[in-house]
Amino acid sequence: MYDNLIAGVPTDLWIGGEWKKASDGSRFDVIDPATEAVITNVASGTVEDAKAAVEAAAAAGAEWAARKPRERGEILRRAFELFTAQSERFAKLITLENGKAMPDSRGEVAYAAEFFRWFAEEGVRNLGQLYNAPSSGARIMVQHRPAGVACLVTPWNYPAAMATRKIAPALAAGCTVVLKPASETPLTMLALMPLLAEAGVPAGVVNVVPSRRSGAVVSAMLHDMRVRVVSFTGSTEVGVKLLREAADNVVRPAMELGGNAPFLVFEDADIDAAVEGAMIAKMRNQGEACTAANRFYVHEAVHDAFAAKLTEKMAALKMGNGLDESVALGPLVNADTRDKVQELVDDAVAKGARVTVGGTRPDGKGFFYPATVLTHISDDAKLLREEIFGPVAALKTFKTEDEAIRAANATEYGLAAYLYTKDLSRGLRVSEKLDFGMIGLNRGLMSDPAAPFGGMKQSGLGREGAHEGLMEFLETQYVSVNW
């Protein structure tokens, strides 16, 4: 039933510019979240395969690093064009293995492609410095060199964008990479490899090793001295483990971890605009996003109006197979994710929360969960502390600005926050007091390849996108010289 959708999609490991079986011949199934049927099976890389991929990346490293920045940039530019030309194909593939509705998948493909275009341009801006040492008079010459082989570990929620957001700056910087995609969604990156080869990426510069043995495979790479960067997007729990592993060889970490974004609505906000922003911030990718708004703090004077309008919007979303063009809400990625959402909702309801829409998983096949709005949330409800990662909006009231700020900051996470107010002074004042790496001020969408994406506290280390994303793959070298 899936032959037309996956026609031409490779299912083996991509190592050194060749498709290879896993060294032990093992494979694993890829599941359609909408039907729970097996789409296909994919080679499951071993520790030996991971080592072979690092070997291939290291062998290609010197020549790739020696390429002129403009040459690397032109290859990335061609990758942008080839990927964009096949945008509909990739959107369907993302929906097939991830579950998200087609409008979401199309948005992801466009976003993912932009990282190729942005870093095609930004890679030529690897600028150094030259200045005089104040005391000795020697010249201080500073340059930025490619760090080396990069291990990239990506999640299932954005199988295209989370990978291109790492691949593009790494290649622009002159690094070679080994990518370990999420086991739930390996097909999108495997399908991209022929396009990168066509764009001119040399053999060994990008390698892809899907595997069900993620821990052992990534550990093997982190304990190879030639791997100098690990870039990971995923849960804080896994990120902490990788940081411990990276410490063994002092591998440079770039970590984009969990979030639990607050969404503040002040009494002077444009309620209609706030609701529209809430739908974007909450419902992109079915709420399966680290930047998703989870905790809605709404001023008591406008809470009822906001809750009513948000409930109406959420209730209007059609749920179903994401490949159906009329569907706005696809399934969650797997049973565990769906069941965790239900657990958090049940906990909140048991502690007094009221359900205005949704709240119960449907019967039948597929990992579906309806758009849900909860009000009257108790302070001890688990969903105020834990990342929901599903289509659930939890509303609480506040009275004062300080109260809203305290509630928003009452989390170990610090990735994204949103606030709505017509008072620009208030908006900027509150933004400065929020302990989050990214703020959406009267905006429900903040992700942009030209912006530094990343968080504070347990939401991660480093930044992706912008010029900062390039610097994650560069080492600073200083030369002291007289002339």
Image (spheres, helix red, strand yellow):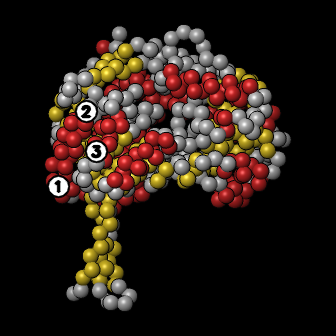
Q: Secondary structure at mark 3?
A: helix
Q: Residues within 10 Å of mark 3 (few under 14, many from 20)?
A: many
Rendered image: mark on residue 46: 2
Q: CA distance from mark 1 to mark 3?
A: 19 Å
Amino acid at dot 2:
Thr
Q: Give the amino acid at mark 3.
A: Met
* Dot 1 and dot 2 residues touching (CB under 8 Å): no
Answer left or right for 142 relative to 57.
right
Residue annotated with mark 3: 221
Position of residue 327 relative to residue 52, above or below, is above
Q: Which of the labelled discs sits on residue 62, or is there none? A: 1
* Residue 152 place in picture, x, y as percent: 34, 43
Quarter of the image for the C terminus: give it.
bottom left
Amino acid type, label 1: Ala
Q: Position of residue 179 (x, y in %)?
A: 31, 40
Image quadrant in which you'd find residue 161: top left
Q: Residue at x 19, y 40 (%)?
A: 52
Say which of 248 and 257 sits in front: 248
Mark 1 and mark 3 in contact? Answer it, CB < 8 Å.
no
Reading the chain from its start, which is encountered first: label 1 or label 2?
A: 2
